[in-house]
């Protein structure tokens, strides 16, 4: 597994963080906020070293966002309620976005007065966990696709607030396209998509009319790709759309429901599972397009694809040009932990969690 390492860190302004609420511990576990308040009230300011790590072979995502949380959220409230920044009093070392990381390898070190950043642990760890999860999942799919395009389509399966950072993680991990402008915003891209079922419905279930209208409006700004499963006749609909759009058609997308058997398979018997998007369906569509002179029309498949299923398709040489992958890219876990491992210059960590040196960490200015 390898990432596309981003050596230049994103500006903290990129993330549009709710800074005041982060500073006040709104998003933090209450015990971290209580720890900060108690230490400040007691006049105790331990100089600590904190290390953050996770427990599997993975890719590092969310580190620039975590650093932004520290830059903008570290500090304390003065007696007058005015925020006194604390970033300049910390020494932070970190790896970069997209780097390969090993189990228990420290990816972030924070040294300084613990009261300045104790309240931020929940927020920066959650950021690392979420973005690394997406990045690792996407990278596994990209590797399984063996050079084929991977389209990142899980927006509808999760809360809209996660889109921006998840889209960035998917981009760093190698996804070719994302489906929303929010997902593409951190690198200045745009969301991409296909002629959807909703538009086909709006034109009375006429896929050709919907595709033609879409192409009239958006070609050549976008690669026109059309869903062809509305009538459960992917071969017939793909040919109709290809004939109608000609050179304006970039590709067709197969998305047959997992409990449906496409019309082109009704007369076939064999040892394959006939439901959903399967090998024989893709082969039938490819053969029909080629026979009709539409060799340049690409085939995109979607509907329940993950790294394992894509790997099987590639091993079988299925004529797919791109994979649309959704909910599998946001499932699983990639949890992070942060430990105080040194206090006032002396080793001080709970049993089994001592300091782990990591020469790869770089100072964050």
Image (cartoon, rainbow, N blue to C red):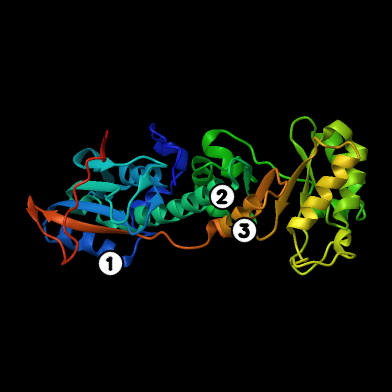
Judged left or right of residue 51, residue 326 is right
Disc 2 element: helix
* Label 1 with label 3: CB-CB less than 8 Å: no
Find residue 127 and report its horizontal and vertical position in percent.
Answer: 41, 53
| In the depicted structure, whether residue 160 falls above or below residue 246 | below
Q: Quick one: 147 or 199, which is closer to the camera?
A: 147
Residue 31: give its label.
1
Q: Is residue 45 visible?
A: no
Q: Position of residue 171 (x, y in %)?
A: 53, 41
Q: Earlier in the sequence, mark 1 or mark 3?
A: 1
> Which one is in front in this view, the residue at disc 2 or the one at disc 1?
2
Q: Secondary structure at mark 3?
A: helix
Mark 1: which secondary structure?
A: helix
Residue occupying the point 22% across, 45% down: 358
The quadrant in which the C terminus is found is top left
How crowded pointer 3 is (Cα within 10 Å; few <14, some 14-19, many 20+) is rated as some
Q: Earlier in the sequence, mark 2 or mark 1?
A: 1
Instruction: Tell me if residue 116 can be seen.
Output: yes
- Picture coordinates of residue 181 (x, y %)? 62, 41
For label 3, the residue is 309
The image quadrant that residue 189 belongs to is top right
* In this picture, residue 334 sits left or right of residue 338: right
| Real-space Cα separation, disc 2 to disc 1, in angstroms | 42 Å
| Residue of label 2 | 144
Q: Residues within 10 Å of mark 1 (few under 14, many from 20)?
A: few
Q: CA distance from mark 1 to mark 3?
A: 43 Å
Q: Is residue 176 left or right of residue 274?
A: left
Label pair 3/2, CB-CB below 8 angstroms: no
Q: Quadrant of residue 244?
A: top right
């Amino acid at each position: 597994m390898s990432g596309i390492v981003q050596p230049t860190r994103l500006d903290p302004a990129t993330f549009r963080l709710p800074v005041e609420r982060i500073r006040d511990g709104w998003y933090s576990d209450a015990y971290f906020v209580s720890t900060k308040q108690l230490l400040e009230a007691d006049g105790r300011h331990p100089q600590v070293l904190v290390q953050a790590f996770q427990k599997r072979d993975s890719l590092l995502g969310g580190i620039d966002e975590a650093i932004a949380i520290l830059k903008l959220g570290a500090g304390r409230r003065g007696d007058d309620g005015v925020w006194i920044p604390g970033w300049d009093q910390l020494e932070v070392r970190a790896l970069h976005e997209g780097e390969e990381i090993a189990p228990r390898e420290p990816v972030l070190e924070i040294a300084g007065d613990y009261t300045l950043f104790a309240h931020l642990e929940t927020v920066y760890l959650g950021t690392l966990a979420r973005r690394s999860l997406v990045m690792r999942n996407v990278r596994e799919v990209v590797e399984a696709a063996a050079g084929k395009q991977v389209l990142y389509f899980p927006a509808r399966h999760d809360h809209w607030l996660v889109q921006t950072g998840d889209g960035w993680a998917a981009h760093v991990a190698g996804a070719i396209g994302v489906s929303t402008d929010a997902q593409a915003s951190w690198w200045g891209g745009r969301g991409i998509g296909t002629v959807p079922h909703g538009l086909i419905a709006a034109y009375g279930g006429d896929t050709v009319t919907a595709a033609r209208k879409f192409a009239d409006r958006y070609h050549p700004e976008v690669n026109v790709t059309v869903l062809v499963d509305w009538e459960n006749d992917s071969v017939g609909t793909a040919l109709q759309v290809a004939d109608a759009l000609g050179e304006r058609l970039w590709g067709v997308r197969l998305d047959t429901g997992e409990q449906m058997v496409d019309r082109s398979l009704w007369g076939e018997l064999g040892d394959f599972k006939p439901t959903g998007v399967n090998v024989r369906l893709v082969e039938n569509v490819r053969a029909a397009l080629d026979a009709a002179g539409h060799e340049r029309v690409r085939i995109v498949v979607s509907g329940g694809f993950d790294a394992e299923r894509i790997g099987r398709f590639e091993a079988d040489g299925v004529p797919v040009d791109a994979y649309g992958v959704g909910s599998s890219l946001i499932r699983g876990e990639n949890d992070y932990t942060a430990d105080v491992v040194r206090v006032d210059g002396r080793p001080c960590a709970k049993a089994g969690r001592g300091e782990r040196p990591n020469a790869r960490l770089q100072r964050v200015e």
